[in-house]
Image (cartoon, rainbow, N blue to C red):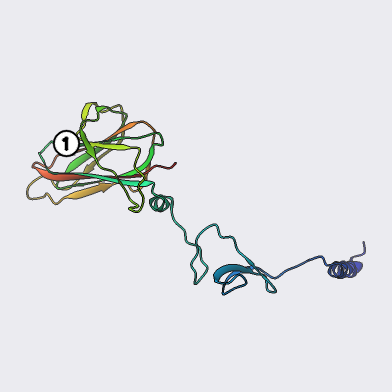
Amino acid sequence: MNRAVRPIVIGLVLVAALVGGIAVARPVAQDVLLPGGPAGGNTLYRDFGTYQTQVVSLAPYDTVSGAPYWLDVAHYEIHYGGMFHAEFTNSSVANNGTVNVLMSTGDTGGHAIFEVAVGGQSSVQFWEAPTAATGSTVVPAFNMNRWLTRTAESLIYAAPTITATGELTLVNRIIPAGATVQTRVGGQSSKGVEWVLAPNTDYLLRVTNTSGGAVPVSVMLEWYEAQ
């Protein structure tokens, strides 16, 4: 086709399309808040210039700006009752003494983080599948959404009887918080990125005081169980 003829042909096509009622273009869409809009109320609509259609929002949004709210997974699990918290404290652990906390997961496993606070230098180990008897000291697990009553599948035990720690040490670290009376200042170790724990499996978190004297030790576990 001759290049000079193309604009005329295209123009005729556009005219024919408009006459035939075929939409060939539309304004750039944008989401707007229309107070008392077509359906009444402060509702989010998509504005096409000559008309508006209500937006089906997949996330809650700010009623002033229309910007969506975003929650990370852990925050979402708190809101929907799937996040749990358990904590155990021993106020005086002798030098070379240990604090053992056992987590026994349920059918859904768990996505867990832990935190350890100590009054002096200590070591922290985290083992998978130890040989252990759960013992009688159950550490209560609290749902972090206090409006809901869902309970954790995983169980937490303090001072379990450990026959063997197991071959797989997932964490082995030192908290350098001072090893003499003059240098003990306390310290903390935490795991900010979650461990995705296997279902129906035992996990042992052990803290050993190596500070040279008696110190307090606190162990915290937080986890969610995605159903």
- Whole-percent x, y for residue 215 in the image: 11, 45
Instruction: Write down the quadrant of residue 204 in the picture.
Output: top left
As drawn, 91 above or below 67: above
Image quadrant occupied by the N terminus: bottom right
As drawn, 135 above or below 22: above
Q: Which is nearer the eye, 101 or 190?
A: 101
For the question of whether residue 196 can be seen, the reply is: no
Residue at 19% x, 34% y is 159
Name the secondary structure under disc 1.
strand
For the question of whether residue 19 can be seen, the reply is: yes
Q: How many labels does the image show?
A: 1
- Whole-percent x, y for residue 103 in the image: 29, 36
As drawn, 70 above or below 19: above
36 sits to left or right of 158: right
Residue at 33% x, 46% y is 84
214 sits to left or right of 10: left
Amino acid at circle 1 = Thr
**Which residue in the protein does label 1 denote?**
98
Residue at 24% x, 27% y is 133
Residue at 9% x, 41% y is 212
- Whole-percent x, y for residue 114 in the image: 29, 44
- Whole-percent x, y for residue 65 in the image: 51, 71
Instruction: Write down the quadrant of residue 35 in the picture.
Output: bottom right
28 sits to left or right of 1: left
Image quadrant occupied by the C terminus: top left
Q: Which is nearer the eye, 18 or 186?
A: 18
Label 1: how many Cα within 10 Å (few below 14, some 14–19, many 20+): some
